Image (spheres, rainbow, N blue to C red):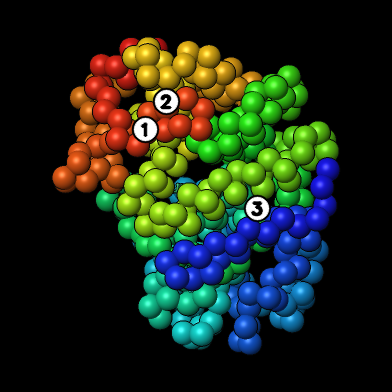
Amino acid sequence: MSTRPIRIGMTLGGRSSTFVLGPLAGLELGAFVPHPPPVVILDQAVASGHAPWLEQIHQSCGHPSPRTLILSGGEGCKTLAKLEEVYGWLAECGLRRDGVIVGIGGGAVLDLAGMAAATWCRGVGFVSVPTTLLAMVDASIGGKTAVNAAGLKNPVGCFHPASGILADPGFLSSLPRGAWRDGLAELIKTAAIGDPELFREMHEARPRLFTLFAGPDADRPVPGVLGSLDWTSWIGRAASVKARIVTRDFQEGGLRRSLNLGHTLGHALEAISHRNGPPLSHGQAVAIGMAVVFRVAAQRGDCPLPAAVQMVELLEACGLPVSHPAPDPAELERMLQGDKKQTSRQGLNWVLPRGLGQMNIFGQVRTEEILRWLD
Ligand code: GLY
């Protein structure tokens, strides 16, 4: 297993954003925090389990006890009310225009902290320390920040890249199995979009993945998980794919849309399941979305059948669902039409695979074609 930190540099909207991956990545915080002490928005899930390590990270930047706001993570924290609470706290801290917010946690806490950084004083510095697999391979890279509003997912947000993204796989030792699965869905997505060799490696590792992730106890850590596969290499390769895409298309004019593979249906099913239960996690919803679009594309003859079969096999090996009870077609249609990626000129474009590593970002899919692949 490699121990040297991996560094990926990006320039996003004219700003530099550096992804650092490795066991001591957090100790580089000082390089991204200028003179005034930073303020920290910390995910409750990591606050107690990693306290000594967090202390070392803070000491490394010369501010051993920064002002810290602890939030319980998960989608529930991404509200306008919570953002307002964060603003109140930033005012109390006296954070000025040249200040820095450090977000430490999973994707939801980073989305909220990033949104606060993007808007407080019209934009202060932001450094992100992702502590979940999903945040390391997806949410922390590329500068998207958002909160949920009006019953929709992420409609209020802006692009505000973190100057530093410090990813230490050690945080994953305490990650519950369910959260691993959510991250694996995004890792598989990124491999399918931009690194077919990584996809094949993951597909070959199915027996190991199955043993680790397909079992019960979704809310418990996975014993021995860190030593069992070369996570640093897999995370680094997924991060490189994402960095390459967002560097070429920061504000999602075209290419970046490929990262929505599985998300069009996924977001719709996720929202419906939260209303009607039982709720799907984001990773579960994206897994179903990917399995369905691969099957639709293969059935049309637009994607080789083996690629679709491998996608389904890999998702299943990771304990992820590949189908779902069909929702009411009218409700599904309504949710799809509300997708924020729809534009008034082009309507809703789906990401449809042409094969591993090749995506059509202008796909058109009829609701009947989707329903055929739902139970
Ligand atoms: N999570 C998709 C993107 O960053 O564009």
* Few, some or many residues within 10 Å of mark 1 (<14, 14–19, 20+): some
Residue type beneath disc 2: Arg
Q: Amino acid at mark 1?
A: Asn
User: Is there any visible trace of residue 69 in the rendered image?
Assistant: no
Q: Is residue 329 visible?
A: yes
**Circle 1 SS class:** strand
Q: Are marks 2 and 1 in contact (CB under 8 Å)?
A: yes
- Of residue 67 and residue 1, the one placed in the foreground of this image is 1
Q: Residue at x 58, y 31 (%)?
A: 196
Report the disc number at residue 354. Answer: 2
**Mark 2 and mark 3 in contact (Cβ < 8 Å)?**
no
Q: Secondary structure at mark 3?
A: loop
The CA distance from mark 3 to mark 1 is 32 Å
Q: Is residue 247 above or below residue 292?
A: below
What is the quadrant of the C terminus in the image?
top left
Point out residue 234 in the picture as x, y percentages from the top left corner.
Answer: 68, 40
Marked residue nearer the N-terminal end (3 or 2)? 3
Label 2 to label 1, Cα distance in Å? 7 Å
Which residue is at the front of the view, 55 or 345?
345
Q: Position of residue 285 (x, y in %)?
A: 45, 31
Q: Circle 2 sits in a helix, a strand or a loop, which is it?
A: strand
Mark 2 surroundings: few (<14), some (14-19) or many (≥20) residues within 10 A = some
* Amino acid type of the residue that numbered disc 3 sits on in the rendered structure: Thr
For disc 3, the marked residue is 131
Q: Which mark is residue 360?
A: 1
